[in-house]
Image (spheres, grey):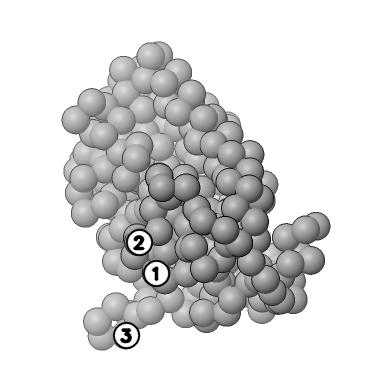
Amino acid sequence: MAFLENSRLPMNLIRRSEDLFVDELYRFVEDLGAPLIAARFPRSFLDVNREPFELDPAMFEGELPDYVNTRSIRVAGGLGTIPKIVAENTEIYRSRMTVSDGLERIETYHRSFHDAVVQLISETKSLFGMAILIDCHSMPSNVRPMPGGRRSEIVIGDRYGTSAAARLVSFVTSGFARAGYDVARNKPYAGGYITERYGKPAIGEHALQVEISRALYADEADFSRSTSFSKVEDDLKEVFSRISEKVRETYPSSIAAE
């Protein structure tokens, strides 16, 4: 409630950065034997796909601790751990927050989320010798176009080949392509803090980011499911069922989905 009271924006503007219905689209993964972690708080409130302390000093009363990263590209763009803006460069807050409130928000939400991810990766790797994390996101349909004006429907991010084995990336990319989707790799989204932190293919820990266009399954204006929601949900289940089969054939592993 305090977040909304300190926001200068109406709810419909705050929600523009929301990964709309993504937890529902991927609820099938439990049927495949994979755990699913869903962040039950808005990305405009706190973004777990950032370092723990990527913060803009201009958003706070008082001085931030020395360990805070105030100079990252994401902070400069207003999209740090506690975002300054939502879509279309619109500032969220009416006034500055206290440093203690900001740090408490990070401790409560960011730390607990990542502690759960670390535990699941450790458990999965101890059981299967490797772990695969799929970081699930949605993107607006007006995302900046590729050269030639193309706007992809699915974007697979692997930090330009560093966060997951090439064979695994190929499974995911070709799976979506065969399902009829326009798929791009790393552009415009290569993956954020989650893929960077957890993607260590050399030691059997793989991380991929999957962005899906909201226009495929939702009305972006009123934040509602469209008539194609069920189809997209079924397509995702079919794609990841086939990917799971390929992974099980190729690797002694399980899929850990976030």
Q: Secondary structure at mark 2?
A: loop
From the viewer's perspective, tell me whether residue 232 is left or right of residue 127: right
Is disc 3 placed on a helix, strand or loop? loop
Residue at 52% in and 81% down:
88
Q: Which residue is drawn at the image coordinates 35% and 37% (left, top)?
A: 198
Q: Is residue 18 above or below residue 157?
A: below
Q: Which residue is mark 3?
A: 149
Location of mark 1 (residue): 76
Up the image or down, 129 lies above or below 240; here it is above
In percent of the image, x 23 and y 26: which residue is there?
203
> Counting other residues with Cα less than 10 Å from the Cα at mark 3, is it few (<14), some (14-19), or many (20 or more)?
few
Sequence-first disc among 2 and 1: 2
Marks 2 and 1 close (CB-CB < 8 Å): yes
Q: Is residue 144 left or right of residue 25?
A: left
The amino acid pointed to by label 1 is Ala
Frontmost residue, 186 versus 71? 71
To which residue does mark 2 refer? 71
Q: Name the amino acid, label 2.
A: Arg
Mark sitting earlier along the chain (3/2): 2
Quote the CA–CA distance across marks 1 and 3: 27 Å
Find residue 171 and report its image quarter.
Answer: top left
First reached walking from the N terminus: tag 1 or tag 3: 1
Amino acid type of the residue that numbered disc 3 sits on in the rendered structure: Gly
Real-space Cα separation, disc 3 to disc 2, in angstroms: 32 Å
> Which of 100/75 is in front?
100
